[in-house]
Image (cartoon, helix red, strand yellow):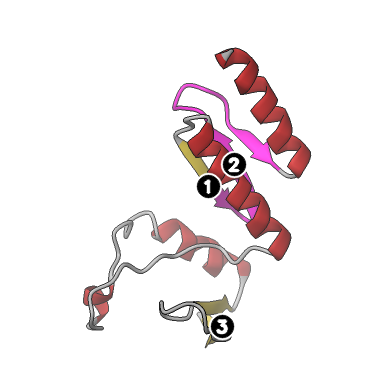
Amino acid sequence: MINDCHRISINHNNTSPRRIIVNFSNHQVNVDFLKARQIFRNFCSKYIDIQPDVPIYIRENLTINGNTLFKEARDLKIQLNFQFVWTKNAIIFLRKNETEKIMRVDSEDTIQNIKGQYEDLNS
C-alpha cells in the first residue's frame, strides 16, 4: 500500500523528468516492491501507457551520504572490473564475480581498502 507519492523539486539544469518518491505504508511492502523490480528489469513507460517510451528505473531512496558512497562503489566497479554493485535495505554491496565473496560497503574507508586490495592483486 502506498502512503505518499510525490516528485522531487525541479532541477533547472536537467531536462529529464523529475524523480518520483514513493513512501510505502510499511517496511515489508517496500521490501516486496524492491524484490519485484528484478522481474521488471527493462520496465519502461509503454507498459503504463505513457509516451514517449522511456526506461523507468526503480531504486532505493538513499541518504545523501549513501548516494555518494553508492556512486563511489559504482565507479570502483568500473575501475576494477567488478561485475556487481547493488543496494539492499539501504546497504551497499560489491562483488567481483559470481564466485567471489560479497563485500559490504559502509564507508569511504571500505572503498579505499577494496581498491588497495584489488590494485595490489593486479600489480
Disc with the residue nearer the chain's start (2 vs 3): 3
Callout 3 crowding tier (Cα within 10 Å): few <14, some 14–19, many ≥20: few
x, y percent for residue 49: 22, 83
Nearest to viewer (mark 3 / mark 1): 3
* Circle 2 Cα neighbour tier, 10 Å, few/some/many (<14 / 14–19 / ≥20): some
Cα distance, mark 1 to mark 2? 5 Å
* Rendered image: mark on residue 110: none
Disc 3 marks which residue? 8
Residue type beneath disc 2: Phe
**Residue 114 x, y percent position in the rendering:** 66, 29
Residue that label 2 marks = 93
Q: Residues within 10 Å of mark 1 (few under 14, many from 20)?
A: some
Looking at the image, do the residues carrying marks 1 and 2 touch, with CB atoms under 8 Å apart? yes
**What residue is disc 1 on?**
86
Task: Find the distance from the CA under tag 2 to the CA under tag 3.
Answer: 26 Å
* Residue type highlighted by circle 3: Ile
Q: Is residue 86 left or right of residue 55?
A: right
Q: Amino acid at mark 1?
A: Trp
Chain part drawn in magenta:
87-105
Q: Residue at x 67, y 50 (%)?
A: 69
Q: Could you tell me if the residues under marks 2 and 3 are in contact, i.e. CB atoms within 8 Å?
A: no
- Disc 1 or 2, which lies upstream in sequence? 1
Eye-nearest disc, 2 or 3: 3
At x 21%, y 75%, the residue is: 46
Question: Residue 104 lies in magenta, yes or no?
Answer: yes
Front residue of 94 and 118: 118
Disc 3/disc 1 C-alpha distance (Å): 23 Å
